Amino acid sequence: MQKQLLITPISDNSETQMSPTETDEYKDVFDVLGLVFIEIRATENLSKAQILADVFHNVPAMMNRRFTLGEIMAEIDRKSVRHGCGRMISALFETAAKRADGACSDFVNRT
């Protein structure tokens, strides 16, 4: 017997949708998540991919549950310290900030 995938449509309930202010608050985190996915996909280092996945895997749920940016950053910091990858995480946030400022437009145009 073949299992069927049940797809539930996303509600258009405005109470559950992020407001533009919330989306703006999370903008840097969204940008970094995009870079993290690229890093995970591109790396040949399984340990690096596992560390990035561990550091960031709760972030979307935290955003969905409306954790503050400070709470999300504290969780990212806590996990990056545990893994000893603080410099790598800082570099991802710096790259995302430069990209948002247009300094990395050549990167965006290559994709």
Image (cartoon, rainbow, N blue to C red):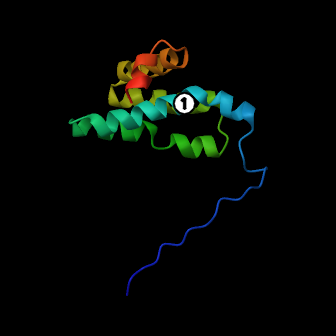
Task: Please name the residue that numbered disc 1 is placed on.
Answer: 29
Q: Is residue 44 above or below residue 81?
A: below
Please give the name of the residue rendered at 31% of the width and 39% of the height, measured from the top-left corner: 41
x, y percent for residue 100: 54, 19
Which residue lies most toward the left here? 44
Decide if residue 43 is on the left or right side of residue 53. Answer: left
Please give the name of the residue rendered at 61% of the width and 40% of the height, measured from the top-left corner: 63
Which residue lies most toward the bottom here? 1
Nearest the viewer among 23 and 49 is: 23
Decide if residue 110 is on the left or right side of residue 42. Answer: right
Nearest the viewer among 91 and 20 is: 20
Please give the name of the residue rendered at 34% of the width and 33% of the height, measured from the top-left corner: 39
Q: Identity of the amino acid at label 1?
A: Val
x, y percent for residue 31: 51, 29
x, y percent for residue 96: 48, 22
Q: Is residue 25 above or below residue 9?
A: above
Please give the name of the residue rendered at 77% of the width and 55% of the height, measured from the top-left corner: 13
Which residue lies most toward the top here? 103
Q: Is residue 20 above or below residue 109?
A: below
